[in-house]
Amino acid sequence: MNSNNHKGIAGAVIIFAVAILFIAASFYYMKDNLIKRNYSSSSEEYLDNNKDPDQMSELIRLVNANSNLSRFIMKVKEKNPSFNLNKFNPGTVTKITPLSSEKVDVKNTSPAWVFSADGKKAVNWEAGFESPDSSLFIFNRKDDGFSEVVLECGIPCKYWGALWVDNNRFVFLMDRENSNGEEGFDFLISLYDLKNGSVQSYTQNFPERPSVPIWPEWEKRLSNIKKGVEGQQ
């Protein structure tokens, strides 16, 4: 076999390898975009109706920007077909006003607390049999080691849980009986901004109490709390 044949074979091999790499890269690109699309498609139509970012609500932009929150919203949608981010009405931005506070020693290993990624701040929600039935706590909001009760509610409310958006912001989800005295339930998504000291709530009304999806982070938290209680007995 002469040198020209060797060159021809080598050239063919190189072209074949380049073609394989191109196909693999194209497949990865399409798969990556499909995953991103799935993360952000938390309702069936809001992306198509709001292609211009300026027309999106702050809530939708927040969901699109956080893959963990997007995945949770998708699970909410699966459990509640009428759930639609476009139908959430924004409330007035209010100041975070603690109802009570106390100095506490909270460790990263404390099972009830869900910490921010940097481990400096934490949030905790609990339900009891006394009044109030449910309370929302924030730890170290002002970097002072205090635990603050920032929200309380009785039997009409059901606290779902919290998801951190970044080191200074988390989303808290809950439902409650319609505050207007009408039938149905309000589902609230509240964004707590600890840096600005503000909270913004978004509300959608449901004819029936919405169903809470199974979320691994919350399931693990409840399991750890149960183990801690059993260990004290």
Image (cartoon, rainbow, N blue to C red):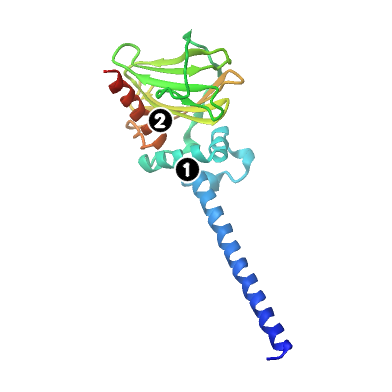
Q: Nearer the viewer, residue 107 or 220?
A: 107
Q: Which mark is residue 205?
A: 2
Position of the N terminus, as image quadrant, is bottom right
Residue 180 visible: no
| Residue at the image point whose x is 66% and y is 75% from the top | 14
| Above or below, comparing residue 86 to residue 29 in the picture | above
Label located before the other in sequence (1 or 2): 1
Image point 40% across, 38% down: which residue?
A: 76
Residue 42's label in the rendered image is 1
Q: Secondary structure at mark 2?
A: strand
Q: Residues within 10 Å of mark 1 (few under 14, many from 20)?
A: many
Q: Which kind of residue does numbered mark 1 sit on?
A: Ser
Q: Position of residue 208 (x, y in %)?
A: 32, 32
Picture coordinates of residue 12, whole percent (x, y): 66, 80
Q: Quadrant of residue 182?
A: top left
Task: Classify residue 30 by image quadrant.
Answer: bottom right
Decide if residue 125 is in sight here.
yes
Q: In this rendering, which labeled residue sits more in front, label 1 or label 2?
A: 1
Residue at the image position 47 percent from the left and 8 percent from the top = 102
In percent of width and height, residue 216 lies at 39, 37
Q: Which dot marks residue 9?
A: none
Q: Which residue in the rendered view is the most extreme toward the left?
A: 233
Mark 1–mark 2 distance (CA, rounded to whole Å): 17 Å
| Residue 66 in the figure: left or right of residue 75 | right
The amino acid at mark 2 is Asn
Q: Position of residue 64 (x, y in %)?
A: 55, 40
